[in-house]
Image: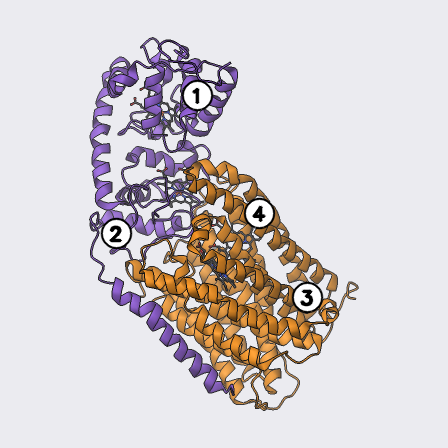
Chain colours: A orange, B purple
Amino acid sequence: MPSQASSPTYATAKGFCITSAFWMMVATFMGLLGATELIAPDLLENVGWLVFGRVRPIHINLVLFGFVTPGLLGAAFYYLPRLLRTDLYSEKLGVITVLIWNLSLVSTVVSLSAGYSQGREYAEMIWPVDMLVVVMFLLVLYNLIMTVRQRREPVLYVSVWYACAAIVLTSATYCLGNVIWRPNTGALVGIPDAILLWFYGHNIFGLLLTPLALGVTYYVIPKACKAPIYSHTLSLIGFWSLLVVYTHIGTHHLLQAPVPTWLKVISIVDSVGMVIPVMVVLINIWYTAKGRLGEIHADVGAKFVFTGTIMYFFVSIQGSMMALPQVQRVTHFNNWVVGHAHVGVLGFSGMIALGGLYYVLPKLAGKPLFSKFLADFQYWMVLIGVSGFTIVLTIAGLIQGNAWLNGETVYRVLPEVHLYYVLRASLGLMIFTSALLGFYNIIRTLYFNTGEFSS
Amino acid sequence: MKMTPLAILVGSLVLLMTIVFVVVIMPWFTTRDEAPSDIFRARTAAEEAGRATYIANGCVYCHSQSIRTIDWGIGAERIAQAGDYIADRPILLGSQRTGPDLSQEGGEHPDDWHMAHFVNPRYARPLSIMPAFAFLGKDDINTLTAYVQSLGLKDADNRLKRQTFWKEESILAYEAGPVENVDWLHHQVPEGWRNIPNPYPTSEAGLARGHKIYQDFCLGCHGPIGDGMGPAQPYIYPPPLNFTTLKGRGVSGGILYYQIMNGITGTAMPYFKKDLESEKIWEVGNYVAVYFINETDADAEPKGIDAAYEP
Ligand code: HEM
Ligand code: HEM
């Protein structure tokens, strides 16, 4: 195996970056399509494979496994070998992983649009696709462990902890949550199924997106600031408390369903307790960056990442409040939650995925970004888009939630939220456009000579 | 603490396993043998087939199946219990109520309403944003309807029995002829209601509001001109009432109010008491009376003391 740190090709990292940029276009298009169907339900009347109920899971699975996760892995496959002072164990295996990854995404789109779904949110994919997903995570894990084994740096940096934990834990919870020992249904029966599903569902955010995003943050922020991380102790506390607390809170999705009360209590207490892992990490990162925001501002990648940490703050504080039963009487079942989901997955982990991508891209390509302007433009489009989503969907959610509490029927409230659906789709158009430009920028950077745009 | 690869990998896996034991396996032990609830029954093969269609088309992303203590809408008569779900693999609680909760949807409407609604929800509910499902074809819509009609299990069966009984009665009345049909319809309205005129005066503003409500709620069946030829008409039997058949038959504001409020179980005519408050029902009733029946008893005696807002 190549342990000589020759000049690396970064084929795997590049592969994941392109995967992310490509599927961001498809995923946001699906979101936009779904949003449009909620305004004009007969736009695609009787085009069965694009009916809202099929578009929505495609959107969600593509943002999770097509855009955000590969984006974060693209950065990881760059920083891991460097932090471990070795080469990636096998670029060939890495490239094969990227290919399988894309194959699984294509199968996801095809199977869901053809109506093959297991009907469990975040675990829709049918068994053969599940198998592809498991294989791709195991391949990443193998490559990662072997790289760690051949490292020449004795001390493991925080980003390495997060990347290893994210991949090993997701490999495990994915199998468990998708009930892969029951290929036909991929489900348990009754209430235990709901409990398992939301244990798994929340771990997609808590044990996959969050640790991968924090890994990138811990790499990019100190690098961009040229400062050591503020506190090793805080890094340790942040890491272990995340694993312990996040895994307990899945049942806060079921507070109004007939599940055992003690389990609800655990989930509420730990949801509030999430303040600890979140704030510990944020204090650590923000103190590292203290007084050095100029450096962060100067690098578009670091700017994305830093903005992502602010979103992490907001989504988590909001989340802790949403786990309180009194709040959830209003927020549950409506667009408030969709707003929260977009701040989390797009504002926090998606922003950081884009940040990692733009941070490592010039290093992968060996030349500057094709266009810093386009990257900046994308930054603003995504920032405006996701902030707008939050405002618009929170308002819509409050209207729905309070009207329902007051006894108005769902049908009666539809015209009241129509305007907000229109605004959401308009903001979505901005995000989708920026995804197109981002893809162009990334391809130009990697494969063409630097154009006149560059600055 | 020294973070070795072993500490990270094994440490996090051991943590995960411990926590899985607490938050997944322990609850599994305490909930897996849940006793069936009072309404539980097994589903038939057709209902299961319909459930598969429900899953394949993502109905779960817009419809919950989980009634809470704070709910008012469809199904709010019965709070969800763990024992309702013991045959659900997967459970379809849902996380979003873009449309209403369907836990107790069975028997809310007769089958013909569902056929019109699935072909295109705007036919039955003009402002709906639910997708059209005509592409599924007649057979799949039928099994899907069978599933939807089973939601609520034994409670649904009771409601469906009521629907079936009154469906036969309403068809007999309809086929007997327009005069007999109207007699039958009015015979179902409790005696007291039949003699009540609409207590509020006709006003331009009131008619305009009635017009808006008619368009948002009634148009798909009774049609823009009240002749019963809305787009849902081909799917519904007995067909939506042609309001002109009511002319000269002594229809009162009270009859209109009662029929709109309570619906006509067995026919596709839904109840609107959850959607519309009292004022709105009087106003849409008067709109129908003035524009389609061309006779209104609004403000006729006995009407009691005039309400304070009347000019
Ligand atoms: C760390 C503190 C957090 C807490 C306490 C929290 C809490 C919650 C709660 C209580 C809900 C359920 C709302 C309901 O159904 O009524 C929820 C939903 C959600 N959360 Fe969070 N959240 C947190 C962070 C995050 C982060 C960081 C992300 C994304 C990476 C995220 C993504 C989501 C998504 C996507 C949903 C929607 C799930 C669905 O119904 O489909 N959350 N969160
Ligand atoms: C073009 C931009 C986008 C648009 C128009 C859009 C639109 C939508 C729509 C219509 C839904 C379904 C909500 C419902 O059922 O009522 C949704 C859900 C969701 N979207 Fe997006 N989206 C966009 C981008 C993204 C991005 C980039 C991400 C993540 C990186 C994302 C993550 C999610 C998640 C996690 C959900 C599930 C929410 C829940 O279950 O509560 N979306 N989105």
Image quadrant in which you'd find residue B155: top left
Q: Which residue is mark 3?
A: A303
Characterize the local packing of mark 1: few (<14), some (14-19) or many (20 or more) Cα atoms within 10 angstroms.
many
Q: Which residue is mark 2?
A: B84
Q: Which residue is mark 4?
A: A392
* Relative image position of residue A144 (x, y in whole percent): 51, 81
Rounded to the nearest angstrom, the CA distance separating label 1 from label 3 is: 58 Å
The N terminus of chain A, quarter of image: bottom right
In the rendered structure, are the residues bearing label 1 and label 2 in contact, judged by CB atoms less than 8 Å apart?
Answer: no
- What type is the residue that disc 1 sits on? Glu
Q: Which residue is mark 1?
A: B283
- What type is the residue that disc 4 sits on? Val
- Label 4 secondary element: helix
* Relative image position of residue A442 (x, y in whole percent): 66, 66
- Label 3 secondary element: helix
In the rendered structure, are the residues bearing label 2 and label 4 in contact, judged by CB atoms less than 8 Å apart?
Answer: no
- What type is the residue that disc 2 sits on? Asp
- In percent of the image, x 28 and y 66: which residue is there? B28
